[in-house]
Amino acid sequence: MRSDNPHGKSGDDEHRSSEISKIKNEMETADKIFYKELSSKYFLLDKFNIEQLKGMCQNLLGKGPDVEYYEDKTTKKRKELPQYKEDYIHFIIEEFRFSEIKNYALEKRIVTSHFFEK
């Protein structure tokens, strides 16, 4: 079988390789943005109270962080663990970009525009 490609790859292989490279680059870019925004997201979200964090999750996603359970080994009873402010902050950090959090905070008057001035 002879290939017209000097590298010995078929057109499909090149296309797949190109798609994989494109996806990899998109993921790397998303990771860079995530880590660049991380401290700003946390600093802003720390200004929210737990009810405001819950409201953001419900209003924008219709859900919050997954509920976790503890199972007592002797009684075999499962107990729902409480969710704290940090649980919501971590969930929102994963789900939203800084600009979305900022817009929500301004819209709901959690902070004013002066908060973002340097």
Image (cartoon, rainbow, N blue to C red):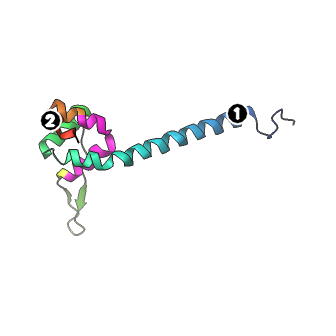
2 vs 1, front mark:
2
Answer with the quarter of the image where residue 99 lies.
top left
Q: Residues within 10 Å of mark 2 (few under 14, many from 20)?
A: few
Q: x, y (%) of residue 6?
A: 82, 38
Is residue 91 rendered to the left or right of residue 114? right
Is most of the magenta stretch helix, strand or loop?
Answer: helix
Extreme top residue here? Answer: 107
- Report, in whole angstroms, how far the alpha carbon at label 2 lies from the one at label 1: 53 Å
Q: Which dot marks residue 70?
A: none
Q: x, y (%) of residue 30?
A: 44, 42
- Per the image, the residue denoted by label 1 is 12
Answer with the quarter of the image where residue 22 lies.
top right
Q: Amino acid at mark 1?
A: Asp
Q: x, y (%) of residue 85?
A: 17, 51
N-terminal of the pair, mark 2 or mark 1, is: 1
> In percent of the image, x 33 and y 38: which residue is there?
97
